[in-house]
Image (spheres, rainbow, N blue to C red):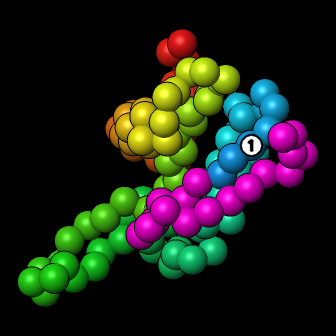
Amino acid sequence: MEWKIPLFGHIGGDDFVALIPGNSCEKICQNILANFDANVGRYFTDKDLENGYIEVANRKGIIEKFPLTSLSIGVVVADVDRFSNILEIGEVGAQVKHAAKSVMGSSYAVDRRK
């Protein structure tokens, strides 16, 4: 079965999945991150943007500094016969998402293993 449009789903919390046909994942990631970063600033005060962080009370009421919101994307290329089941794809997805989150600011990581 071949499809032409991306399919999107919610995994849970702040995790989402997109199934993208074709080989354009890098350009799509770059466009998503550019759009996100260009628009996320409207949700912060000028002071927050100047500081590069927000100050928020944690669950114990103690004020903490948190970095401004960023976006991390993990990409798994699911070539035919690469994975034997959906759980393997999920495991690799978690690994590349972790790699993307290890970079400060918005970023993406692509699993290039065969």
Query: Is residue 29 in view?
Result: yes
Location of the C terminus (image quadrant): top right
Residue 14 covered by magenta stretch: yes
Location of the N terminus (image quadrant): top right
Compared with 36, 89 (above or below) is above
Position of residue 82 in the picture relative to residue 94 (left or right)? right
Is residue 24 or residue 35 the one in the foreground? Answer: 24
At numbered mark 1, what does the secondary structure look like: helix, strand or loop? Answer: loop
Q: Amino acid at mark 1?
A: Ile
Query: Where is residue 13 drawn, in percent x and y?
Result: 41, 69
Query: Where is residue 25 drawn, in percent x and y?
Result: 72, 34
Q: Which residues are magenta?
A: 1-17
Is residue 57 or residue 50 the one in the foreground? Answer: 57
Question: Who's the residue at 13% across and 86% down the image?
Answer: 61
Query: Where is residue 8 drawn, in percent x and y?
Result: 68, 59
**Going by the picture, which residue comes out furthest to the bottom?**
61
Is residue 6 or residue 56 the one in the foreground? Answer: 6
Residue 79 covered by magenta stretch: no
Compared with 58, 85 (above or below) is above
Q: Quadrant of residue 66?
A: bottom left
Question: Who's the residue at 55% across and 66% down the image?
Answer: 10
Compared with 80, 47 (above or below) is below
Is residue 58 or residue 92 the one in the foreground? Answer: 92
Question: Who's the residue at 36% across and 71% down the image?
Answer: 54
Question: Who's the residue at 86% across and 51% down the image?
Answer: 5
Position of residue 60 in the picture relative to residue 105 (left or right)? left
Position of residue 63 in the picture relative to residue 21 (left or right)? left
Compared with 72, 96 (above or below) is above
Q: Which residue is mark 1?
A: 20
Query: Where is residue 42 drawn, in percent x and y?
Result: 63, 74
